[in-house]
Image (cartoon, rainbow, N blue to C red):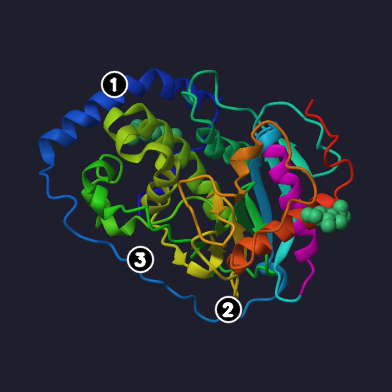
Amino acid sequence: MIGRKNIGRASPMLLILLALGFFFATYNLLTLIIQNRGSNSGMEFFDPVIRMPEKDTRAENSKKYHVALTATDAPYSQWQCRIMYYWYKKMKDMPGSDMGKFTRVLHSGRPDNLMEEIPSFVVDPLPQGLDRGYIVLNRPWAFVQWLEKATIEEEYILMAEPDHIFVNPLPNLANGDHPAGFPFFYIKPAANEKVIRKYFPEENGPVNNVDPIGNSPVIIKKSLLEEIAPTWVNVSLRMKDDRETDNAFGWVLEMYAYAVASALHGVRHILRKDFMLQPPWDLEIGKRFIIHYTYGCDYNSKGELTYGKIGEWRFDKRSYLSGPPPRNLSLPPPGVPESVVRLVKMVNEATANIPGWETLRSG
Ligand SMILES: *[C@@H]1O[C@H](CO)[C@@H](O)[C@H](O)[C@H]1NC(C)=O
Ligand SMILES: *[C@@H]1O[C@H](CO)[C@@H](O)[C@H](O)[C@H]1NC(C)=O
């Protein structure tokens, strides 16, 4: 575990320092790594073992987690947030739920037209240009600011995203200092050892100490996240600034940044495959908790998946980049898996019940 005290609090100063220090830091790191590392990466497979929590005996109330949804004011983000919040409200008080309050952490730097509908907290985006067009780099910085400035009653935080729908009441899956995360099959620290080692040097332990996760969904003690978040800002900006890392990690760079930052603090996550399901690949809801609709669902009229080819029937969030989907989307043809049918029904239920669904314009 690196000294938590040494990491320090992030401040606007951090960003200025980072901006100035980038090229030097990266250059030095690269030189070091090229000198010190052989190329023995990529040979091991890291099979994510599911680590189950022990029985938790603490009082119900201290188990509550605050739902923190990072978002922007873009219409694409807004309509997803509205659906997300609708299902939070429905699940919150159901038996088995440990949900506490909800905050949309809005990292656009100014209020939008959903402030009344969804409890929201406005934070600043990264200084102009620092995100290099990769908007999600704003997430760690958003968490740093929110944790510093907001009053949060709950002891735990769920880091959530707009394309999450709560499909079953979600208990607190964390256990004390062990947060809970979802193992993503495409996050492979061991297979990327050479790159990971730039940020997670050998003295921190085996590369498998970096969990195969992203920051979301994760349920974590607030006090731990307060320690990790500034490191997460630091690591994500350094990763984005390093061409080899940027090329290796691409659109999942941000996920690796959280995985590495938490590992630098000696934090290991309980890996819960039942945390989330991802249509169309996961066919059934079962006892899983969150539907993540990041993949397009395309089917022909016989109910066969035509992934990669636009189907006669489809639901893809990216079809609605500039405004909300209409109410009452058509249901998929017979033969389509339960997970997809349920997703569309849940979207339809939310849009039918949210006042002003199709008329709300961003502003
Ligand atoms: C960010 O990382 C650099 C390079 O490791 C380090 O020198 C600096 O202290 C870090 N800053 C913070 C606030 O973590
Ligand atoms: C939804 O659309 C279906 C046809 O796809 C139609 O039969 C139904 O009446 C519509 N429901 C509402 C509430 O508009």
The percent coordinates of residue 218 (x first, y second) are: 54, 57
Q: CA distance from mark 2 to mark 3?
A: 23 Å
Q: Residues within 10 Å of mark 2 (few under 14, many from 20)?
A: few
Q: Is residue 108 above or below residue 288?
A: above
Q: Indicate which disc, 2 or 1, sits on the residue closer to the N terminus.
A: 1
Identity of the amino acid at label 2?
Asp
* Between 256 and 299, the one nearer to me in the picture: 299
Marks 2/1: CA–CA distance: 46 Å
Badge 1 marks a residue whose secondary structure is helix
Closer to us: mark 2 or mark 3?
A: 3
Q: Classify mark 1: residues with Cα within 10 Å, few (<14), some (14-19) or many (20+).
A: few
Is residue 82 one of those drawn in magenta? yes
Residue at mark 1 = 24
Question: Which x, y percent locates residue 36?
Answer: 12, 39
Report which residue position mark 3 lands on: 48
Q: Amino acid at mark 1?
A: Phe
Which residue lies at the image location 57% right of the left edge and 69% below the top edge? 173
Please tell me which residue lies in front, 304 or 37: 304
For the magenta stretch, what is the residue range? 77-94
SS at badge 3? loop
User: In the rendered image, is residue 30 in sight?
Assistant: yes
Mark sitting on residue 56: 2
